[in-house]
Amino acid sequence: MAQVSIRINGRSYDIACDDGQEDRIHALAKYVDERVKEISDAVGQIGEQRLLVMTSLLIADELGMAHEKLDNPASQAAEPDPGSLTAAESDALADNIDSMAERVEALADRLGKD
C-alpha cells in the first residue's frame, strides 16, 4: 500500500492508495484543488468545510451530467460546441453558472445550519 501527500486549498493530506496509483491520486487532487480555487474565487473563503462541501456538490453535478450524456447519447448531438457559442449564448451560459453557484451556496448555508 502506497502513501501520497496531496495539497487541497493549501492544506496537506496524507492519503493511502494502491501501489501504482500515486500519479492518479495526484491528478485527482490537482483537479479538486483547482475546483476549490474556482469556488473560493467566486464566493470567497467561507470556511473550509463549506468550501469542500460546495466543491463536492459541484463535482457530483459534473459527474451526474456526464452520466446523463452516457445514458442518452442522442442529447449530445443537440448540444452546441462550446467554441461556437455566440456572445448571447455565452452570456446565458455564464448566467446559468452564476445561478448554479448561488443554489450551491444556499444549499451549503442550509447544511451549515444543521
Image (cartoon, grey):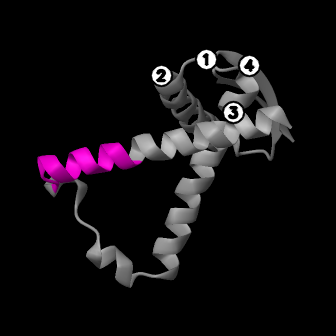
Q: Earlier in the sequence, mark 3 or mark 1?
A: 1
Q: Secondary structure at mark 3?
A: helix
Q: Is residue 101 above or below residue 82?
A: above
Few, some or many residues within 10 Å of mark 2 (<14, 14–19, 20+): few
Q: Badge 3 is on which residue? A: 52
**Residue shown at 22% from the left, 48% from the top:** 90
Say whether residue 86 is magenta.
yes
Region rendered in magenta: 85-96
Is residue 22 toward the left or the right of residue 13 in the image? left
Marks 4 and 3, how far apart at CA: 14 Å
Q: In the rendered image, which quarter is residue 107 located in?
A: top right
Q: How far from the left and from the top, in percent, is residue 72?
A: 46, 82
Marks 2 and 1, how far apart at CA: 8 Å
Can residue 23 be spotted in the picture? no
Q: Secondary structure at mark 4?
A: strand
Is residue 17 toward the left or the right of residue 94 in the image? right
| Mark 3 or mark 1, whichever is nearer to me | 1
Q: Badge 1 is on which residue? A: 45
Amino acid found under the numbered disc labelled 2: Asp
Q: Badge 2 is on which residue? A: 41
Amino acid found under the numbered disc labelled 1: Gln
Q: Which mark is residue 12?
A: 4
